[in-house]
Image (tube, grey):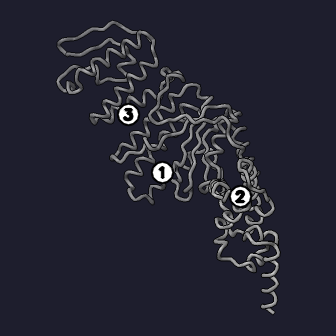
Amino acid sequence: MKVTNITFDREKNKIFNICPKSIEMCPDLWYNNKENRRYGNMKKQNVLNLIKYHVERNENSFRNEAIAIARYFDSIGDYQLSEYIMGLISESNLYLPQSSDFESEFLKQVEIRNLEALNLPIEITEDIKGIINAVNHNVGINKFLFEGLPGSGKTEAAKNVARLLDRSLFRVDFENLIDSKLGQTNKNIIKVFAEINMLQNANKVVVLFDEIDVIALDRINSNDIREMGRVTSTILRELDRLTDLNKEIVLIATTNLYSNFDKALIRRFDAVINFNRYSDEDLIEVAEYYFSSFIKNFKGISKDTRLFKKILKTAKKIPYPGELKNIIKTSLAFSDVGSEYDYLKRLYNSLIGSLDQKDINQLHEEGFTVREIEKLKGESKSAVSRKLKREEVDSE
């Protein structure tokens, strides 16, 4: 792109024959008439900066200056021009920031080194392998929706997908994106997709919309149909644009509220992975992994894996991994230093109910042995045996 000489027509009061790219991006800036004087002297400097950065071939500064101009127009209410400029930037591959210079308002890089082992059912593991294969085939299958209950491993799975693909992971920061001001969230979504399209080395990036349901619930069931409709329609449009412009960035979204998810948005994803496929055996295996990992950090605690697993099997419902991990960790951390099996009592309380309200006979009926009841109740084995015999005699 070549810069032509600047000329000025005093009768029309109009600048022309200037950087074509700059005119295309910011047409209103080049008119010095009364109608546009409200843009002020600040815009003159921006125009000069655009020309300067273009001549110097400083693409990163040119991009940042254009974004600053777009934000200015947004701040004075000229939303159409602001969105137009951001759209031009997002469609251009000329102004990609260097990774070291990249600063984003809405994208935060996630650390994916030293991740914990991912304990997933084999069915979900196979789906994760399928995602890796699909991306490596490089056929444009690059948008995936992970749905499931809280704590089912969706976010951790997304991190591991990025690690296995040897890509950087960027998370969309919904705290900054969602705005109570009417229409601002919609404009922020346009900006975040512009930032996504400006990420350098698209084939080395995964973008995560974690818990995307905060902005993409069903438009029909929303309390504010018009506002949610605008937001979801913008997401649909930007996802389509992403598909057209950038087929190498991998996009993963997660949701806890799949049943309330907008159906048109679901269709924009190449695959939906269901994380609600844990059997009790899967959850017990996950719990045993966490138990073995945590207990080695505690002194004065005796490891009883058999009783640990029996408590889990006795529970009417075993929580999903996220909650289960916290229960196991706190049972160990809160346990009495002077009691080697106090963590098992706390685990029982969390998963089944108050152990203090259960008598020895009830525990025996639940399948616990005399020795196991001794550990749970803190009574001697002989005392437990006597009480059980007394109960048997009384029942006769």
Q: Which mark is residue 83?
A: 3
Q: Earlier in the sequence, mark 1 or mark 3?
A: 3
- Residue 120 shows up from this direction: no
Left or right: residue 248 versus residue 241 is: right
Residue at image location 59% in from the left, 42% down from the top: 252
Residue 59 seen from this side? yes
| Labels 3 and 2 touching (C-beta < 8 A) | no
Residue 278 circle label: 2
Which x, y percent locates residue 193? 48, 35
- SS class, disc 1: helix
Q: Secondary structure at mark 2?
A: loop
Q: Are marks 1 and 3 in contact (CB under 8 Å)?
A: no
Q: Quadrant of residue 373?
A: bottom right
In-image side of 149 versus 316 (left or right): left
Callout in the foreground (1, 3): 1
Residue furthest to the bottom: 396
Q: Amino acid at mark 2?
A: Tyr
Disc 1 designates what residue?
214
The type of residue carrying mark 3 is Glu
* Neighbourhood count class around disc 3 (C-alpha, 10 Å): few under 14, some 14–19, many 20 upward: many
